[in-house]
Image (spheres, rainbow, N blue to C red):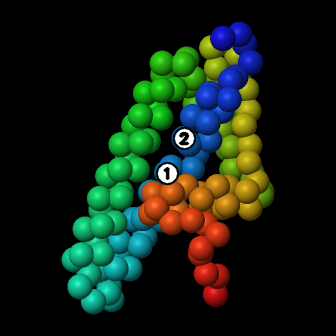
Amino acid sequence: MGTQPTAEDMELISAFIELPIVLSIIESNIAKVNEGFRMHEVFRANLVNLQSEITNDLRDVRAGMRRRGIKIVEEIRKGDRVGVQYLCRGYLRDFQILHTHLKNKTETRLAGYLKIRVEDIVRD
């Protein structure tokens, strides 16, 4: 595998950053559904199922990171960036992503879970 992180390593690290954000969006929306949707039980059940799927995926990401020798040392929030400092097979590295890029990636990931195309989203 060498000392450089592979594309698969970077995908796991990116998912490690994105999935908790997607989970917090789902949690926030569950609260909103409970406050005012008609037939809120149905919508809530759908969101809770989605939350479980994302949680399972995050667990798989963490297991994949362990198998590949990747350990998150520190989460970094600095200005317009979010990132992590991580050990990858004994080498300390940084990975950072701009908030705007992270928003796009989490939106795309959430749309995938909901089985909708990002191109079909109508913006207000």
Kind of residue indicated by mark 1: Pro
Query: Residue at point 74% right, 61% down?
Result: 100
Local packing at callout 2 (Cα closer than 10 Å; few below 14, some 14-19, many 20+) is many
The answer to whether any part of residue 99 appears in the image is no
Quarter of the figure with the C terminus = bottom right
Image vertical order of residue 81 relative to residue 73, above or below: below
Local packing at callout 1 (Cα closer than 10 Å; few below 14, some 14-19, many 20+) is some
Q: Residue 53's spot in the image, x, y percent?
A: 35, 50
Relative to 38, is 10 on the left or the right? right
Q: Residue 60's spot in the image, x, y percent?
A: 41, 34
Q: Nearer the viewer, residue 104 or 31?
A: 104
Query: Residue at point 39% right, 37% down?
Result: 59
Q: Residue 33's spot in the image, x, y percent?
A: 34, 79
The secondary structure type at the circle numbered 1 is: helix
Q: Nearer the viewer, residue 56 or 27?
A: 56
Image vertical order of residue 71 relative to residue 102, above or below: above
Q: Residue 71's spot in the image, x, y percent?
A: 56, 25
Query: Residue at point 68% right, 43% down?
Result: 83
Residue 16, numbered label: 2
Quarter location, residue 35: bottom left
Q: How many marks?
A: 2
| Residues at marks 1 and 2 touching, judged by CB atoms closer than 8 Å | yes
The answer for how far apart the CA atoms under marks 1 and 2 are is 7 Å
Relative to 88, is 3 on the left or the right? right
Query: Residue at point 54% right, 41% down?
Result: 16
Image vertical order of residue 46 relative to residue 67, above or below: below
The secondary structure type at the circle numbered 2 is: helix
Kind of residue indicated by mark 2: Phe
Relative to 122, is 115 on the left or the right? left
Quarter of the figure with the N terminus = top right
The answer to whether any part of residue 85 appears in the image is yes
Residue 20, numbered label: 1
